[in-house]
Amino acid sequence: MRLAALFSGGKDSTYAIHLAEKLGYEVSILLTVEPASDESYYFHYPNIWVTRLQAEAMEKNLLTAPAGASKDEELQALITLIDQVSGEIDGILSGVVKSGLQYRLFKKICEERGLKLVTPLWNQDPFKLLRQMIGEGFKIMIVGVAAEGLGKELLGKTLDDKLMEFLEERSKRYGISPVGEGGEFETLVLDAPIFKKRIEVLDYEIHWSGYDGFIKIKDAKLVKK
């Protein structure tokens, strides 16, 4: 079955591709919506341009569409991308984990076009998912935080067992989503088993407002593994 993946460059959408290919799906197309700002309703904003490097690292075709600032404009950008490829694929791949809103929305869009929605991460235990990612060689950088209990010191850190323990504690204490699906934190995958090359960040700057912030990657390149 041929799939186009909804791709943000973060851990969940990348891990969904990894799992789907292990299950025998063909994922050759990535669909990326480029939000107008970090106040996006549905999509990642920090460093969305790096998806071009990630697509090259995975040797996959990347289609992008800019979106306006409103929820409707973001949704229309997504629909435009899906309509571009609907005749070439059998389904859409999403890395949704717990968000019922996103799941129902994506499913409705797919059903209206006769496409299957494939969600290999759906309703999985979030802590188990994170540990699987780490164990399978995913290098995941935290590039944004926006929740009580998560501070500036997390920006630029790579997810590891020690950081996992911290996130588990914060999740229990503050009710933070362990996978950051509510926007509590944003991630960027720098390396994964499905990458032929890894991403090296050469330069970045931190934007911090006092309660939340993000890393803006100014320069990065692909290097041999």
Image (cartoon, rainbow, N blue to C red):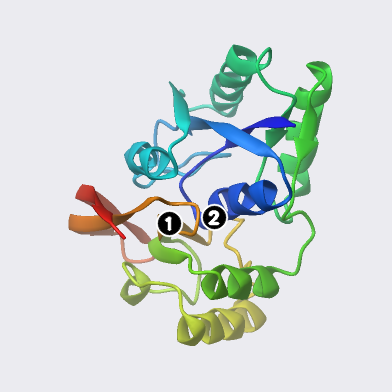
Say what amino acid the circle numbered 1 marks.
Val
Q: Is residue 135 above or below residue 30?
A: below
Category of crowding for the residue at label 1, using alpha-carbon neighbours closer than 10 angstroms: few (below 14), some (14–19), many (at least 20): many
Residue at x-position 62% and y-position 71%: 132
Q: Looking at this view, is 173 or 127 the one in front? A: 127
Q: Looking at this view, is 67 or 199 the one in front? A: 199
Residue at x-position 53% and y-position 80%: 164
Looking at the rendered structure, the secondary structure element under dot 1 is: strand
Q: Position of residue 194 (x, y in %)?
A: 50, 52
Category of crowding for the residue at label 2, using alpha-carbon neighbours closer than 10 angstroms: few (below 14), some (14–19), many (at least 20): some
Query: In the visual, does 120 lie left or right of 32?
Result: right
**Residue carrying label 2:** 183
Q: Looking at this view, is 185 or 208 the one in front? A: 185
How many numbered discs sit on the rendered protein? 2
Say what amino acid the circle numbered 2 marks.
Gly
Q: Position of residue 197 (x, y in %)?
A: 34, 52
Q: Position of residue 150 (x, y in %)?
A: 45, 73
| Residue contact between numbered discs 1 and 2, judged by CB atoms under 8 Å | no
Q: Of label 1 and label 2, which has the lower sequence position? A: 2
Q: Is residue 185 above or below residue 24?
A: below
Residue 102: assigned label = none
Residue at x-position 54% and y-position 50%: 14
In the rendered image, the quadrant that contains the C terminus is bottom left
Q: Position of residue 82 (x, y in %)?
A: 63, 20
In the rendered image, the quadrant that contains the N terminus is top right
Q: Looking at this view, is 89 or 178 the one in front? A: 89
